[in-house]
Image (cartoon, rainbow, N blue to C red):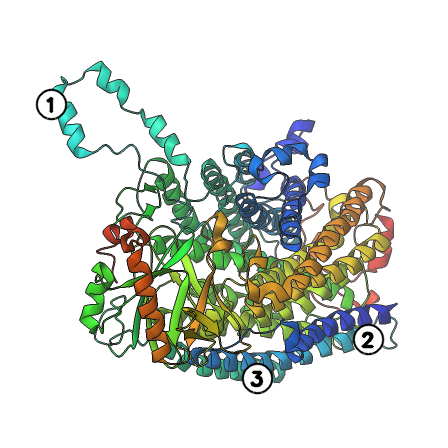
Amino acid sequence: MSHDSHPAPGNFLTKYVFSSDHKVIGIQFLFSGMFFWILGGLLAIGVRLQLGWPNQALTELLKWFPSLADSIPASWGSRISPEFYTMLFTMHATVMIFFVVVPWLGGAFGNYLIPLMIGAKDMAFPKLNMLSYWILWPAFFFLLASFFVDGGAAGSGWTAYPTLSSATQNAEIPDPGLEAAAKASAPANSPAQASLEPSLWERIKSRWNSPAAGQSGQGQVYWLLALIFSGTSSMMGSVNYITTILNCRAPGMTLMRMPLTIWGMFVTAILQSLALPVLTVALIMQFLDRTVGTVFFLPPAGLSFGNWQTGTGGGQPLLWQHLFWFYSHPAVYIMILPAMGMVSDVLVAFCRKPLFGYMPMVFSMIAIAGLGFIVWGHHMFQSGMDPRLGTGFMVATILIALPSAVKIFNWLATIWGSRIRFTSASLNALAFISMFIIGGLSGIYMASTPVDIYIHDTYFIVAHIHYVLFLSSMFGIYAGIHFWFPKMFGRTMNETLGKTHFFLTFLLANGTFFPMHILGIRGHPRRYYDPTIFDWLASVQPLNQFVSICAILLGLVQVIFLANFLFSIFFGPKSGRNPWDVNTLEWETPSPPGHGNFETTPIVLRGPYEYAVAEAPGGRLSQTGIIHDSTQQGKHS
Amino acid sequence: MHRFWSLLFATVNLACLALLVVAFACPELGWWLPDSASTQAIEIDSLFYLITALCGFFFVATEGILIYSLWKFPSTAPGNPKPIHGHLGLEIGWTIAPLVGLLVITAASLPVWQAARYQGIPTSTLPGNSETSPDADQVILVTARQWDWHLKYATEPLSSEGIRQWAAEGTPSDLVVANELHVWKGAKVSLLLRTTDVIHSFFVPALRLKQDTLPGKTIPMRFEATVSNVRFDPAEGRVVPTDTKGSWEIACAELCGGNHFRMRGKLFVHPDRKSYDAWLDHSKRQTRSRSLTAMVPQAASSIQKDGFTQ
């Protein structure tokens, strides 16, 4: 395959910066994700400061961050303004979804693990792989630059629904009567008239400043560009993953001998390659609406905003929602399926028992991905689409709970009767399972269309998405980082710090997100700058404060993880090839693996989960099959 | 040490469960569902409790097994694990058990959804051509804009054809009120929702009613209030609360800009039509003395003329 064609890199620049080695690219994704993880966390803390203590002057805090104070309108003093607040939650969600969880799961773990776990020397297309990382940099630029443009970063929600996100003032359309009069009085091609006409660039720029949402002027355009580039990156990645998994597996590595991590990545890559083009098209359509004046999302009669109007349209705002959710619902699975796979592998490694129900686990992943394409409408039950469509989407949505339940039961059966070693990695994996139960069950409430009438766009939804994305995906990522860190850096992370971080994160994340269910049951709408103006929400303000305190502490304790991670890269105890004594192929390579990964091409003889084998030394049979004393090998390397 | 981790998982899960139980059992905290004051609210609440019961069972069962396993099967336990790779009977069993629960939820949800949303759809028409049923006691046109609600009350009986024309043009005797929804107990209310600018969402928690307004469309919605909270006092010339129910609020549930949270309205359910009519007459006299047209967003009526149920 093509990996033979790219030689081992020579100098520093080709080895660590513009590298086409999948391991370096994976670690690049890991580090950039970490930067945005910090940024997204700080934005979340801003949201919680406002919700816990609405209208509180943050004079003391802003003294420390003078640049932040500059971006708040003077009339609000040192308080967070409503427009600034909408920017905070919009950018928090955007950063965390598109710049942290997706790049971490797909970019970092996908890149690092796929060739190693299937026994390949590298990805099928190493150059494309390199490009998939570097095309993220324009996305980084537009995302970060958007904080500094006029009006600040985007503020129409991470869902960017038109017409809030897309309506632009149509001041430059001249009155037809006046125009005719001007033509009659002035000779054609008069230079005086030409100078009165706004240039194309001026017209485009005038559209950038949308008065519809105070904050989503130019910031929204930058937001669209950032997402177009990050989507392109994911697209390149998924094409590469599919090809690599289908074509570059080691001899004997049949599809049904692949570890579940690889199955998760494979199914995700297929999902992504089918769904992403739709989002990209939608983003480009909104970009054209914002810049050159197309009207894809503007209704025929146009819109009237108090003292200004749009031109006439011909489009349909609901179209955006269909296109957006056609990607963004599968995106929820893109952000959980790889974590499900990783958690299965971590769990088995520390349970010392075969995975229960390998085939049902694989088929439930495929079922989730398949059904995932026909449930997007459950985000739109209240959107004004035909209620009969809602019925169909409800049935599909309720059915998708079934494969998720099957996965839960199989994990529980894997743990049952095992011998669990409690490490930072296994604890985070166990937390994933425990929390995914809560996140999965709360999803059933919104699948039921009538209950969704009430809880739609309340904090119940916020609680649900954070149980799935933070308490599940993030715990899966923590488990994965602790587990594969020795392979990536040749050293192990500190267990005491790891367990302390897990203990505090587990407590505080539940303290942050569980009470949000109660807020939602009460009817607290999401994206509210100040809920205290409502009588019926006064009673839940103490809960809001509790959530805010937990959230701020939750942010602080992530420093433990960050410190442990950075410290261990340089000072962690050296690990051998196979510190956790695991069967899968990546542990047969040196830690960290050299260019080309494997010293000799591995021959795969069996599945990845042969544990509790009484006859084999160490009670396990590695995938390559040579019965060897793994503990000995670990010591020698 | 393994006991510690098992207990941590137990504590966290029990604390979550306890918070739900406390919120449910202590209504005085105000941490549970707000007052429920419509036929739809009662049905949605029952469905909510049905789902809670089924999910509660699965939650306790699965988390219980997980916590017990952490307690019972640490690496320090004697003996070795068995190399079990699966069990067909178990797989079939735990596929069918949740399927039954999920089908129960689906079956219970369908009629409630149809009652809440299907009423306006004549079966003979194509999707999207929805109409309000002609038997409404009250027709109210709700126009959302950044950042308030304008409610136009029809003061004369309307046929189903007449509604379409009325929504587009109105009649001079109409009453337009900002941010106040007045109905009476037992009235079949037909709402027509529209917006002049961005997407909003008309959310009345006490009615368990929520519907987005969509630029370019008029969306019909129906409800029937079952509890009243105010009556019109002719002597004082205003509505007064009748019992401890107090005020019910209207909120916007779809992000519509910086002041999204400020779209606060109020719901007034009169005990009977008499009280409502008295309020209506009083309000019309009041607004006639001011300028009616000043209250109607001019652009709204001109721009939205052809926007009815496209």
Please, which chain is the residue tagged with disc 1 on? A
Q: Where does residue A455 sit, x and y in percent of width and height?
A: 51, 68
Measured from the top left, where is residue A558 in percent x and y? 75, 50
What residue is pinned by disc 2?
B71
- Outermost residue toward the left in this view: A184
Disc 2 element: helix
Q: Element under label 1?
A: helix
Q: Which of B73/A509 is in front?
A: A509
- Residue in view at x 25 percent, y 44 percent: A312
Q: Which mark is residue A184?
A: 1
Q: Residues within 10 Å of mark 2 (few under 14, many from 20)?
A: some
Question: Quick one: SS at disc 3?
Answer: helix
Nearer-the-camera pick, A421 or A396:
A396
Q: Which amino acid does label 2 sit on?
A: Trp
Which mark lies nearer to you, 3 or 1?
Answer: 1
Give the quarter of the image for residue B87. Answer: bottom right
Q: Are marks 3 and 2 on the same chain?
A: yes
Q: Residue at 57% x, 60% y: name it.
A: A462
**Which residue is the site of mark 3?**
B97
> What amino acid is labelled 1 in the image?
Ala
Say whether marks 3 and 1 touch (CB < 8 Å): no
Quote the CA–CA distance across marks 3 and 2: 26 Å
